[in-house]
Structures are given as C-alpha cells and as structure tokens.
Amino acid sequence: MICFWRMNINKTSSLVIGGVLIIVIAGAAQFLFPRSAVSPIIPTATSTPEQNISTTTTPVTSVTDVKITQRSSTAYSLSFVEGESITEWDFKGAYTGNPELVAKAQGEINRLSEELTTATSSAMILSVGIANQYELLGDGKKQYEYLERAIRTNPENGLPWHNLGVLIERLGAYKTARTAYEKSTLVQPEFKFYHYAYIEFLTSRMKEDTTVIEKAFSFAEKNIGKIQYLDDMRSEWEKS
C-alpha cells in the first residue's frame, strides 16, 4: 500500500497507490501534510532506489520519552514508553475482507521478500514496501517487524521512522508514536514532510503539551525556515 498525505490538517486523508522516487515524494510533501504511511518506489532486481534517498546524517540531540536502543554502530530499535503496550495489533486494512486483494498483497509480499533475501542497497526500500503490504492486510505486527527491519538497515533515513510513527499512533501508543515521528525530523531535518507530520501529530494528540510543541516548531523553523504553513499550523493550534 502506498499511502500519502492529508491535504488539510485533521480533515481529509487521501491514499495514493503507485510511487515516484523518494526524494520527489519528500519534496512534494512540503505542500501536503501526512497522517498516513508513505510508501517508497518498489525496486526491481536491477534497480537500487535507495540510492535516490537523501541520507544526510544530523547528530541526534534528543528523543523524547522513549529511548532508541542501539544494537550495533548502525542499528537501532524503538522501545515502547513505560506503561504503553499494544494488546491488539490487527486492524481493518484497505484489503481486509476482499480475497482477491488479499491474494494480490500476499503475492507482492512474496515477490519483495524474495528480492530482500539478496538485497543490499535496496534493503530498506524493500522492507518498507513489505510493511506497506501488511498495512493493506491490517497486520500491524508484521508491519511493525518490517519497519523495524528497515530502520536497522538504514537508521539515518526518516521514511521508516515516520511510517512507524503512523502505525504506532494508529494502535494507540501515542507517547511511543511521538518519539518515532520526532526521530524522522532528527535524522532528516531538511525534509519539510516530517516536520509537518510531527507537528500535526502533537497538535492533535498532545495539544496541551506546549513545551514539546514549541520545541517542535522551533526545530522546524531552524531547519526549513519560518514559512507560512508553519505559521498557519501554529495559529490553528493556538485557537484550538
């Protein structure tokens, strides 16, 4: 499943099936505002689309509430906030209850999984692609596992962190989701897409936490500039 951005904060969600290069997606997202998972272009055996993703590394100064567990010099995992857990991982996916579409998703999972067994530079993209198919099926546990795999493959790319935030928010663990969203802004602070998603999440789910929200606005302005849409988001939050 390739889910895209909401055109208006807390109003309309739209799903986009298909893909373009990730860096184009990230650029377009400067004007579209996400609360759904983003999908990468699905590579073939001869393509390495991950090479098209910006992997600029920015030192991480803080991550709120949840610690990122380092497994090796380049591998990280998201730990749930104390007191939060997922008791029900399944949800109604876009393909749930439709045998033809379920079979289609399973076929795509099989294809991508086969490619993943020998993948090198495209492993992160393939893992996110498989995770998106499990989202279509409503299998949150498998989606989580493949997003974690994507993060272990490339922890300095914001895409799997963002999608993990979307998933965990959907499953109701908001403090943990907050950390995943924030992490996407920390590892790729030049992408407006991730700042918009993080601030939208905070102002809808944690709108009383003014300190964290102000910090998110300040960090966004520092990295993407004091643009009109950030002012609009602030005004909407302050009026809510």
Image: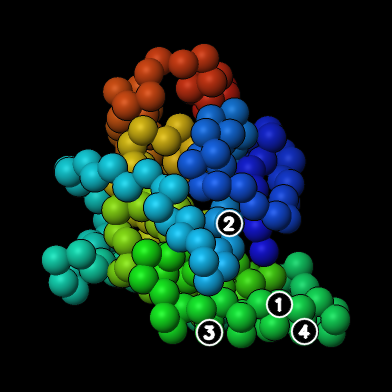
- Residue at position x 51%, y 78% from top? 115
Residue type at numbered disc 1: Ala
Residue type at numbered disc 4: Ala
What is the x, y in percent for residue 101?
81, 76
Residue type at numbered disc 3: Glu
Residue type at numbered disc 2: Ile
Q: Left or right: where does residue 119 sit relative to residue 92?
A: left
Q: CA distance from mark 3 to mark 1?
A: 14 Å
Q: Tag 2, which secondary structure?
A: loop
- Residue at position x 72%, y 50% from top? 16
The mark nearer the N terminus, 4 or 3, is 4
Q: Which residue is mark 3?
A: 114
Q: Which residue is mark 4?
A: 103
- Quarter of the figure with residue 198: top left
Residue lying farthest to the left in this orientation = 73
229 shown above or below 126: above
Q: Local crowd at mark 3 within 10 Å, few (<14), some, or many (≥20)?
A: few
Q: Tag 1, which secondary structure?
A: helix
Q: Which residue is mark 2?
A: 41
Labels 4 & 3 near each other (Cβ < 8 A): no
Q: Local crowd at mark 4 within 10 Å, few (<14), some, or many (≥20)?
A: few
Q: CA distance from mark 4 to mark 1?
A: 5 Å
In the rendered image, is residue 196 in sight? no
Quadrant of the drawing holding the N terminus: bottom right
Q: Which residue is mark 1?
A: 105
Q: CA distance from mark 4 to mark 3?
A: 17 Å
What is the x, y in percent for residue 93?
71, 71
- Quarter of the figure with residue 219: top left
Q: Tag 3, which secondary structure?
A: helix
- Residue at position x 41%, y 74% from top? 119
